[in-house]
Amino acid sequence: MEDLAPVLAPTLGRLVRSPGTNLNWVAALFRRLDRDAPEVYDRFRRLYGLSRKIASLASFPPQDSALLGPACLFAALLDIAPPSSASSGAWLRYLRERPWPHYALQAGRTAHDVAAARADSRAAAAVTAAAVIDNEAVIRSANVLRALRELRALAATPELSRIAELLWTERGQSICDLHARHGSRTYVIEPAELADAIRLLEGERKAARSESARDGRAAHQPRKEDSSKTPAAAPATSEAFERRKRAIAEAHNLREAFGLAPTGPHREAAAAATRPEASTSSDGEPPERTDDLGTGARPANRVLPTIEVHLTPPPASEPASAAPILTSEERPMNDARPATASPAELDARLTASVEELRQQLAEIERLAAEGQQTLARLAPTIEGFAAMVAEFESVLSRWRGGRSEAA
């Protein structure tokens, strides 16, 4: 593929001396374009705003959406003639050392020269469609339907054909119509947005490099052989199970010490041992029973309070080394483990929220622009009404003056 870094590096070097070590050059480039090349800056804003709308309509992934900003910037900068004898080594190294400028340059070249290039990627197709609509509807002041027919005629790749069909829908035509009527005033483009997109592309490059390095280390690392053929025998019971058994035994001893009724597995044995002694007295009445502490008589039908201790042994199918299952009585009250989302889910939610906010802001801007147009149309009518009211007041004042003189 064609190396476009030497073509664009002199132009970038003339606008901003060096890319530096961070992304401060983005804001500096915006200010320099707005001051020295306002037409190019306006063209970039129109391309980026419309391609962003197209990406939202076509549901682009975040990676392709992030590539739209640099591609539209490079497509607009190709309209600036480079210096005759000038070169920027810092920009040349910057554009060649990173992978994302190569794809952005290819997409920008496709949008700059539609007839000579093919929009194979999603970003190139979106920027190309935005360039065709902008050329026909804004620069040549053609009808939106004519611009869409021109785009459908140039759709030589599947991605560009898909975007052309989406723009032919009612929602797509409304986006193109708003772009044709208001141009760059429809969109709000900030340098921080382009800087964030470049950071996203740089983060993907670093993640891909770290993953490849990790795979390389895993490939060269020798595999550890397991010397033991059979796993070691697991203990029959776990430590928590033994603690529960000891707690039940201590509870039984305490109940015996206070003369209370036994519970659990000791209840049946105690009932069998005391059943022959449970007889009536000589006069046919049941013997008088005392309370558990020996403080006096109590009714025979009184039910003693019992303390239930539930024993939940570990399942037989699970290994003994697994964590013991705790019942609701044994689980700590503060053992609350809230479910945490993965970084990918958080990133997807944040991206969806930001995109929704952008759509809402664009809708607000569209309504504000339509409101301004409505006020502009109503201004002559309001002025006519004001003139009529002033004339009526002058006539009324003259009539009142004539009546006062006659009186």
Image (cartoon, helix red, strand yellow):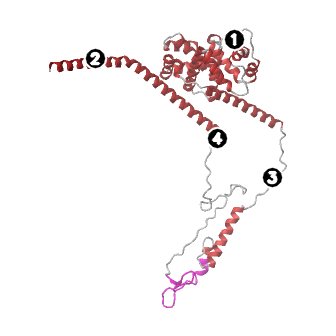
Q: Quadrant of the C terminus?
A: top left
Q: Residue furthest top?
A: 84
In the image, 189 versus 358, the foreground residue is: 189
User: x and y percent of residue 259 in the render?
Assistant: 60, 79
- Point 54% across, 19% down: residue: 184
Q: Is residue 357 above or below residue 37?
A: below
Figure quadrant of residue 68:
top right
User: x and y percent of residue 227 in the render?
Assistant: 85, 49
Callout 4, which amino acid? Answer: Ser
The magenta span reads: 270-298
Q: Residues within 10 Å of mark 3 (few under 14, many from 20)?
A: few
- Residue behind mark 1: 82
Callout 1, which amino acid? Answer: Pro
Q: Quadrant of the N terminus?
A: top right
Q: Is residue 402 above or below residue 301?
A: above
- Residue behind mark 2: 391
Q: Earlier in the sequence, mark 3 or mark 4?
A: 3
Q: Earlier in the sequence, mark 2 or mark 4?
A: 4
Callout 3, which amino acid? Answer: Thr
- Residue behind mark 4: 342
- Residue behind mark 3: 230
Say which of marks 3 and 2 sits in front. Answer: 2
Q: Is residue 106 above or below residue 238?
A: above
Q: CA distance from mark 3 to mark 1?
A: 73 Å
**Are the residues flagged by discs 1 and 2 in contact, CB closer than 8 Å?**
no
**Are the residues flagged by discs 4 and 1 in contact, CB closer than 8 Å?**
no
Callout 2, which amino acid? Answer: Glu
Q: Earlier in the sequence, mark 1 or mark 2?
A: 1
Q: Earlier in the sequence, mark 3 or mark 2?
A: 3
Say which of marks 3 and 1 sits in front. Answer: 1
**Residue 97 shows up from this direction:** yes
